[in-house]
Structures are given as structure tokens and as C-alpha cells.
Image (spheres, rainbow, N blue to C red):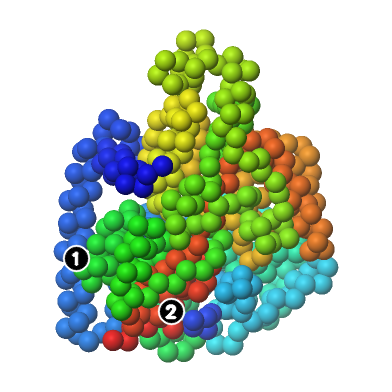
Amino acid sequence: MKKKFLAALLAATMTLSMAACGSGAGTQTTETQTTESEASADTQATTSDDQTADASQATATGEKILHTAASFAYPSLDVHKEYYGWYTSIYGVSEALFKLDETMSAVPCLANDAVSDGTTWTITLNDGVQFSNGNPLTADMVIRNLQRLAAENSRFAYLGDFEMTATDDKTIVIDTKEVYPTLKNDLASPECGMIDLDSTTDFDNAPVCTGPFVVKEFIPEGDVTVVKNENYWGGDVKLDGAVFYYMQEDDPKLLAMQSGEIDCYNSVSSAALEVYNQSPDLYDVVSIPGARLQYYILNENTLDDSVREAINLTVDKDKIAEYLSGTVSAAVGPFSTSAAYGKVNVPAVDTAKAKELLEADGYTLGADGIYEKDGNKLSISIAYYAARSLDTLAILIQEQLKAVGIDSTLRVEEDPDATYIANADFDLALYCMIADKSGDPLYFIDSTLADGAYYNVGGFESAECQSMIEQLRIETDTAKRAELANKIVQIAIDDNAFGYVGLFNNTTVLRKGVSGFAEYVPFDFYGVDAETDING
């Protein structure tokens, strides 16, 4: 496997496919990609001009304005809907009751404590917390926010089953009805950010929140500009503002960084990492173990057991990690092997066995090196989106599968959640998400393996697995939680329902003098905060 060859292949394919809380979706098929690529080039040129103008204006006024790149852009800033709260958190606009720190622990933010006693949690708010308009955050407002979140976001619908009471302006009592050991962790989720529900008139474009920044300009599915919150409850805010340019692909970020148009960004690609490491006088590069997992879903409704097993025996995660040097580590399961709940086993790569499985299932190898059965070639559809190095993964997996006789076609989508995750139109679907939320396995397991889960779209179903997930929801003993998690994940592995490819190293590049862009936090939903600064 030669990097130069793969880099050229990837380029060719993409041408076609195109503080107080701590310091148009749409299918793009290969037939239409040239037009999309030309349109993208025009957009990039316009964005580059805007970046240069913004940087020049900030220099002229003497303001501290951070310019950075965002890999995703969404149509709304409604904190409670979909995953939009991740980005209002990155923008420094919204804050949750708790925040996850460098050790993956839930620490105080808008709330200073959460104490459980059986099925009852008592949460106490910090003193002086207020929204950007000066209105105080009260216990009643917290409850209303959580109730709205439950109604607007299916992943948090369970909050609607809890009984919530404000015993005074600063104290919330939540009765979970059954033992619920991870509530504090859940309340650190960025979707739990607080909005002034009485004063916000436009939830999609201008939510009134508590963060150190407020929205100045929001372009749906485009760039976002924020300015300092002059009423920030957590103290001084070091930046005057920040601009987040929407750049999904890696090369434009590298070029913008080299030209001085942006000051920092995260999820640095392996190719860009090599460039930055050659100029330590210009850039600071911070790489820490992350919690974001690259994985794929195998569609049990379209792929036979033998084909799914053959795929998993063929995809070589170690070689993929080697190619993506410095950015990911090969995964065994969805969690780090150092975690108590990361003790699972995966068969070693065995391409000979993969071929045996296919041939035992009636496939014969054609003259072109591709297996066929009943006159039909064995070709699968691989869906992906061009971020988190998934475009590179798609190429590498395609090459590995072809070497054993499995053909494939690639289909890139801009918004996976609105396309192949929503309609299950794939054979193999690449995705990337945070698997480990604050040192507990339930979030990922519940999101991908539970019956009816948001990401359980490939037909995986197991009564045994579901029974253990129900136990995991209420188990309070840490060792028993780990044991249950390992058994649950092992069932999915043995069923060849998924392929866990790599765990990202959280890599951030910053221009010299830039600091506080959540570079030491292993989660992707933090960015600027009150301590983010530019010096020099």
C-alpha cells in the first residue's frame, strides 16, 4: 500500500465526489461530482476572500478575534435539537449544567453539584449565573429547558419521564423513578445547554444563552461569527470575538492555516500534521488520546452473514492506522483497551479465511478478480462523509476489499444523519462519533446497539443484548457495568454488525500565541471559552 498512490486516488475520487466552566444535505453521486466540485471551488474562493478581509479588519481595530475552521455547519443554532448544541458549545454560546474536563470527568459549570440518593438527584446552581441579556438562570428555567430538550430531541426523550421540582431558585430535585447512575454525566452533554426560553424569539438563529460569547452573524450551513458576552457571569472574557469558517475538507484548512487566514483548528489530518511538525517555530501541535471512534455499520438487511464476516476479516485496521500516522490508533472495540469496559476480542485479519467463507457460500472468483454468484458480481455500496478522515478510510477499505475479490462503489454525503443514517441506504456506512462520554459505556451502547437506537440502522437485533442493556441502565456497581458492557459489545462483534476501525487522537494545531481552544480536552464539542486567548 503506497501513500502516494492512495493520495492520488483519494484526490481523484474527491474531484468526482466532492471560563466558569473551564479554561444542503444531499446525495452526491459520482455522475454529478464535477459540477459540485466546481461549485465548491467557487465557494472556497469566496470564503478565502472573506477570511482575509476579516483578519485585516481585526488587525486594524486591535481587537482579539480568533479565526478558525469548523468541519460541520448546521441549519440551526437551536441548542436542544439534533446535535446543534455541540456547535453552540464550540462557538462558546451555550453552556450545560456540568462540563467534561481533561480526565473525562463531569465538573461544575452552571451547576456546582449533583448528589444522588437512590432515585433522587439534587442539583444546586452556581451563584450569579445569568443569560447574556442579564436575566438570571433559575431552577425553574432549568427544568423547563430539560423538558423542552426531552420534547425536541429523541435521544433525550427519557428526561420527560423524570419528575423535576424546583425547591428554590437554585435547587432542582429530580426523581428518576428508577436508579439512574449517569444523570450527572448526561447533564454535561452540550445538548443540555440552557436557553432563556422567555426571551429567545428565534431559536434557530439567535438563542439567548449563558456562554462567554453571543451570536453576531449566523449563516445556516455556513460561517458563524460570535462576539464577547459583556454580561458573562463567569468573569472576564479574553477574546473580543471569533469567526468559524465552514471547511469540511482537510486541504482548505491547511492552506488557510499556512496563509494566516485562520489561527487554529482540530481534527488535523495526518498529511497536515506532517507539515505542521516541520515548522515548530510557527505552530503548536497538541495531540492527546481522544474518545472519537471511526467505525462502520454493516447492513444485515442487504449483506449475507458470510459477506459481513468476510469484510471484517479483510479490513486491516492496523494498516489504516499506519497510513493515518499520528491521528488515530487502531481500535479493538469502541472503547480504549485501557478501560475496564474495553475488554473485547476481535478476530485477526485473515484474507484467506475471508475467501473461504465466500466460496463456501457459493461465490466464485471471476476473471476480473471479483467474486460473483448467480451471475451477479459481489459489489457493495460504501457511504461516507468527507470529514474525520472518513474519505481516506473509504478509499483504503475499498482497496483492501478489492484485493480479496469484493468490489465496491463509494458515495459521499454532506450530511450523513439526514441521508444514509436516516434511510439505511448503504451496505457499509462509515461514521465517526464520540464513543466514551465521561468514562461510561452506556451512551455509545445505547445509541448504536439498543433496539430502535438512533444509529442502529443496519438491522442488528439481539434479545440477549437488549436485556443486558436494560441492566446496564440501572446498574450502579462500576465493575458490573464494565462486565455488562463487554458482553454487549462482544455480541455485536460476533454478529459482524459493525467494524470498529480507529480511535482518534485529538489533534489540534494552533498558531504560536494562541491558547485555550480546548486542545487538552478529549471531546469534540468544546472550542472557545472565556480563557481562549491570542498573544502575539
Residue 198 seen from this side = no
- Relative to 264, residue 239 above or below: below
- Relative to 342, residue 110 above or below: below
160 horizontally vs 270: left or right: right
Residue 510 seen from this side = yes
Q: Nearer the viewer, mark 1 or mark 2?
A: 2
Q: Which residue is mark 1?
A: 50
Q: Earlier in the sequence, mark 1 or mark 2?
A: 1
Residue at (73% x, 36% y) in the render = 462
Q: Position of residue 219 (x, y in %)?
A: 30, 60
Q: Secondary structure at mark 1?
A: helix
For mark 1, does the 10 Å Cα neighbourhood hold few (<14), some (14 to 19), or many (20 or more) residues? some
Residue at (25% x, 65% y) in the render = 256
The amino acid type found where label 1 is placed reads Asp
Residue at (75% x, 71% y) in the render = 121
Q: Position of residue 210 (x, y in %)?
A: 48, 77
Q: Which residue is mark 2?
A: 516
For mark 2, does the 10 Å Cα neighbourhood hold few (<14), some (14 to 19), or many (20 or more) residues? some
Residue at (37% x, 75% y) in the render = 284
Q: Position of residue 60 (x, y in %)?
A: 16, 83
Q: Label for residue 174?
A: none
The amino acid type found where label 2 is placed reads Gly
The image quadrant where one finds the C terminus is bottom left
Pick whichever, 137 or 318, lies toward us: 318
Real-space Cα separation, disc 1 to disc 2, in angstroms: 24 Å
Q: Position of residue 110 (x, y in %)?
A: 57, 78
Pick whichever, 119 or 172, lies toward us: 119
Q: Are marks 1 and 2 in contact (CB under 8 Å)?
A: no
501 horizontally vs 14: left or right: right
Q: Hey, which quadrant is residue 341 in on the image?
A: bottom right
